[in-house]
Image (cartoon, helix red, strand yellow):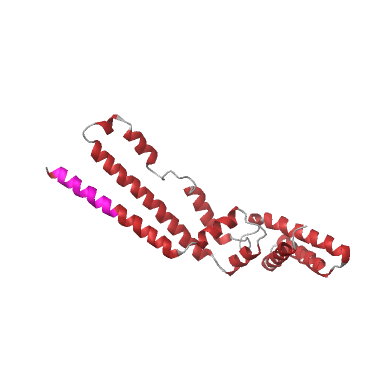
Amino acid sequence: MENSETQKRVINLGKILVEELGKDTDTLTRWMAHYISEQINVAETATGKNKKDAEKRCFDTILKLWNNRTSLPDGKRPFENFEPIFRTLEALDPQNETTFYWRRYFNKLLKSDAALDNTAQGIETWIDIACDIDIAARVLLEFAIKQTANFAVDEKTANWLKNAPDFADDISVIINLTSASPASHILKVSAVILFSVSKDAAAESRFQRQAWC
């Protein structure tokens, strides 16, 4: 059996689920809410050996429902506000350290004959700029996602996080997105943009000088 603190969190989680699901008009959803409410009541009022059995049964029931939270109806799913963020992160694949668009193409180009002729310096300069822009895009996307997460957090989200019995993947992502200081991301974004712009301006100046000579 889990420790008392975990049990308390799970019972609280069950009460939040009951409150949310009990408002639904779907018969099955309301039945689930009623069943969990009944299990909680039995667990809290039972005595002796019956109490331990009732607590375990209640604990297991709540966890089963929690582990299937993504199957709950629209408007009742925990962290539903974050679902568009999860889909966006999946599409962007932030775990991939390779820059999003250009790295493979540029690595191939650098190894080609084109990189060996008299235009090699110009090619390499603009490749560096493109890669810097790619990195800046990653930083800007990270900033945008974190800002989106801040807007997605509400009182319900805080309650789910407070009483969640474990740190599943979705919960870990939410904590990571909402824990960083916004100021640090603004500074990071500004630094990357300024660095990229300064390099772009220098490269453009060199390009214009070469064009006019």
- Magenta residue span: 197-211
Q: In the rendered structure, does residue 210 fall within the stretch colored magenta?
A: yes
Residue 13, picture quadrant: bottom right
The quarter in which the C terminus is drawn is top left
What residue do we see at 76% from left, 57% from top? Answer: 60
Describe residue 37's horizontal placement relative to residue 177 as left or right.
right
Residue 176 in the image, given as x and y percentages of width and height: 53, 58
Identity of the residue drawn at 35% across and 55% down? 192
* Camera-side residue of 146 and 198: 198
Spot the residue most to the top.
113
The residue at the point 79 percent across, 66 percent down is 38
Q: Is residue 55 magenta?
A: no
Q: Position of residue 197 (x, y in %)?
A: 28, 54
Residue 201: % across, % down: 24, 52
78, 192: nearer the viewer: 192
Going by the image, does 182 lie left or right of 13? left
Q: Is residue 117 left or right of residue 94?
A: left
Describe residue 182's horizontal placement relative to residue 113 as left or right. right
Q: Residue at x 42, y 65 (%)?
A: 183
In the rendered view, would you say 159 is above or below 140?
A: below
The spot of residue 135 in percent (x, y) is 38, 49
Question: Is residue 19 positioned above or below 172 on the image?
Answer: below
Furthest residue in direction left, as rendered: 213
Pick the quarter of the image with the N terminus: bottom right
Q: Main secondary structure of the magenta part?
A: helix
